Amino acid sequence: MDDEVGSYLLNQFRGGLQSSKVCWKRDLQELEKLIRRNIENSPAEEKPSLREKLYRLSNILVECQAASFLSCEGIISLLRIRNTLKEIKEELKSKDSITISSNGNFSPQRDDQGNSSNVRDTGRQSHQSVSPLVVHGFDDEITSLVKLLVYERSKEKFSAVGITGMAGAGKTTLCQEIIKREEVKKHFVPRILVSMSKKPDGNKDAKIALVERILLSLGVEENTIQSVSNRGLSALICALHVQLMGKKYMIVLDDAQEGDTWFENLYSPLPGKVKWEQNLAYGLPKGYGGTVIVTSRNKDLAKKMVGEENVHPVLPLADKEKCWLIFKDAVEQDGTPFNPPNVELEDLKKEIIRKCSGLPLAARVLGEIMKEKMEEAPAPNGHTVTVHPQLSTDSNSNV
């Protein structure tokens, strides 16, 4: 990257971070440091891609500055922004580690909990990534689906289930909780969750990228996957079939969005003269008790993948007060009690419940934003003062 252009973009980005109205400021500040280090250490041929990341981050910063809390859609978009920031962060950390390694001074980067950050990223990939926050409002749905998947089916029969609902309804959370249940852990091995919406790098085919992520989540080594992938989609589907053969697997295909016939009818058996690349279903062995769960906002797509009779809708929480519990849990997730001064808790509670409209994800995002605002308000004596973020500026806004 040209030094003048790079310096200008970085300074503009850093200047924008000085605003007190930026959501996810901590993530953005860390990204600013990471990208600055990458620019300083990367070879010339990598500068253009870093410039593109800076342009992208600058656009995201503008979105964060203009973030609106006037609707559930606006609130949920903030979580999508943060997830995008995390993806960019992992890409930059990976490049950072490689660059440092080539300079002979490599040491794994670590996060705030001391965990190594140079790990494989497969998108929201497994039950190990489940948030420690308590889940509210899904007891009946979890019990019903666990009963269906574990007890109300032939032990050797393949099954596919679709979970549908609007953005923020809790489809992914529901699946994560199912994967964690003891009876599920005893019945299904392996158990993985893989994002279908994760965009592949560069010009890679989306189908190939998806099967690669599934294999990676199943524990197949990256070099082995790459070797198979070099032979095309057919070889990857065949490898997936072999990897799962004889196993009672549970695979969650999270956030299905594509309408391609390649994803349809996951129940399809393996034909006599198989052309492996024709259908994802051919990579899913039947007759061993395996299960696939598909989550999607598109009910028609889910029907095509698992059959209309196997689709289970997730509706907004009927007990809206659960959203207040989710909000509080998000604020207090580090153990700090939520006792904001000069705030009428009952009024705040009503506002949170109204804005979330029964959507757990909206409640969690607002809680995390509240927590961030509290942490960004240091008192003169060095202690932290809790503050009430402006969740609304329009009392007549609709959710």
Image: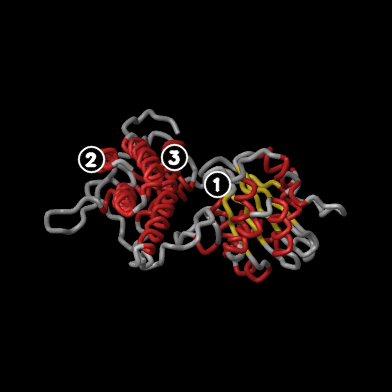
The amino acid type of the residue labelled 1 equals Pro
Tell me the mark number nearer the camera, choosing from 1 and 2: 1
Q: Is residue 89 left or right of residue 211?
A: left
Nearest to N terminus: mark 2 or mark 3? 2
Q: Earlier in the sequence, mark 1 or mark 2?
A: 2
Q: Amino acid at mark 2?
A: Gly
**Disc ID at residue 77:** 3
Instruction: Please identify the residue farthest to the bottom as the structure is shown.
Output: 186
Single out the mark in the foreground, 2 or 3: 2
Residue pictured at 35% horizontal, 31% vertical: 395
> Which sits in the foreground, 152 or 48?
48
Find residue 392 and report its horizontal and vertical position in percent.
Answer: 33, 35
100 is higher (above) or lower (below) than 303: below
Q: Secondary structure at mark 1?
A: loop
> Would you say 337 lies left or right of 379 here?
right
Question: Does any portion of residue 236 appear in the rendered image?
Answer: yes
Alpha-carbon span between mark 1 and mark 2: 32 Å
Q: Is residue 312 above or below residue 226?
A: above
Nearest the viewer among 228 and 61 is 228
- Classify mark 2: residues with Cα within 10 Å, few (<14), some (14-19) or many (20+): few
Marks 1 and 3, the one that precedes in the sequence: 3
Q: Residue at x 39, y 53 (%)?
A: 92
